[in-house]
Amino acid sequence: MAARPRPARFELLVAARYLKAKRKQTVISVITLLSVLGVAAGVMALVIALAINNGFRSTLERNLLGATAHVTVLEKEPGYGLANWRELVAQLRRLPHVVSAAPSLYGSVFLSSPLQSDGCVLKGIQAGSHQASDLARYLKEGALDRLEQDGRLPGIILGSRLAARTGLPLNSVATVISPQGELTPFGPKPSYFRFRVVGIFETGFYDLDSAWAFTSVRNAQKVLSLGDVVNAIELKIDDLDRAPEVARQAERLIGPRLAATHWIEQNRQIFNALRMERTVAIITIGLIELVAAMNILVALVMMVMEKYRDIAVLMSMGARREQIRRIFVYQGLIIGTVGVALGLAAGYTLSYLADRYRWVRLDEEVYSLSFVPFEPRWGDGVWIAAAALLVSFLATIYPASHAAKIAPAEALRYE
């Protein structure tokens, strides 16, 4: 004798049969199909939108932190620089969560070559520091060990776009013109310094690649006509989220003349805009899920009306009202599950392909990126799927409750 199906299996079997059965009312089939496609479209759109948001945020963080410090100590008011920077570096290195501390000196200069001249930011960094390690990750050509001195000329590392625009390839000689030159009776006279291009770096971030050049702190001091001073001390910490805490600790240590700022504060506007964009995307694209939920509601209501007699027969044969309710709940969840599966598959596949082959190109001078980065995360897919299934479940409550309230005697009176 064949085993009787368990109640849950019976309800799921009936729900699946109702969805697959051929009906005279084809409009219900169309609405059911639209419900599946609506759920899939909403899930896919939300996965892609969050992948774009994650991609922009991660790329900006990675590129910005490649050129800026986690925490920076500098003068509150522009002055003559930090003369006691060695003592400060030693003290700041002992702070909790600080991995390393290094001086930096930067200023605006003019880069001249036989092909074209242009302005840039010259930044002096210390050899062997985390600044040099971060720069080495983006080095496209050349070597950092030539930065201090390359033969008779000091070394300089240029951004890839700056090098291309000024016509200064690797091993060429560049002339750096500093406005902080010597003072003459006829006014200030710019100073000229010859450098050997010992490296080309490329971060993929337009603002850095097109306007930054690196040399050693000692060379930068000569170019900017300064003594043994720097204008910033940069800290690298072991946890980026602790940057505000470390900045507060540093301010208590360095005194009232100096200030400590962190990468979150420096880029607050950018990340606030990305956070707002993420919220807006969730709300607006979530409306697609609400439309799909309304389609599920309509499809189930019409199905209850069509299966009025079948429901009465099932109840007269012993089916409980709770089982009838679960049949239509399962129908809505089946629609939602199929839509979620299709949406997740399409969303992650398109995000992967769009990022790998860089389908969406951007104007680098406007967006600082050459393409739209996609970074889909599985964590987002989990809560998107859960939210879509929850909406699908809520859409089943009314039609399932209505089906459970059918009175078999009234429904079969005239049969």
Image: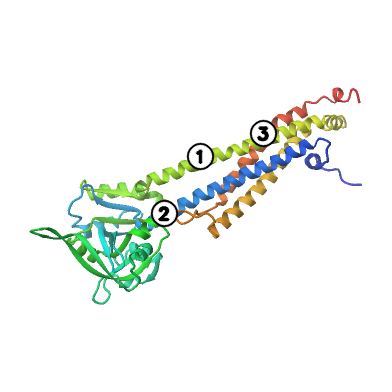
- Badge 1 marks a residue whose secondary structure is helix
Q: Nearer the viewer, residue 7 or 160?
A: 160
Q: Position of residue 47 (x, y in %)?
A: 57, 48
- Cα distance in 3D space between marks 1 and 3: 22 Å
Give whichever of discs 1 and 3 has the lower sequence position: 1
Which residue is identified by label 3? Answer: 294
CA gap, disc 2 to disc 1? 23 Å
Q: Residue 281 at x, y = what percent?
A: 53, 41
Q: Which residue is mark 2?
A: 368
Mark 2 or 1, closer to the camera: 2
Q: Furthest residue to the front?
A: 115
Residue positioned 63% across, 51% down in the render: 346
Contact? badges 3 and 2 (CB < 8 Å): no
Kind of residue at disc 1:
Val
Q: Is 47 drawn above or below residue 124 in the view shown?
A: above
Q: Mark 2 near mark 1, Cβ–Cβ under 8 Å?
A: no
Q: Residues within 10 Å of mark 1 (few under 14, many from 20)?
A: few
Question: Residue 106, can we see it?
Answer: no
Residue 271 vertical placement versus 165 (above, below): above
Amino acid type, mark 3: Met
Q: Is 101 in front, or is 5?
A: 101
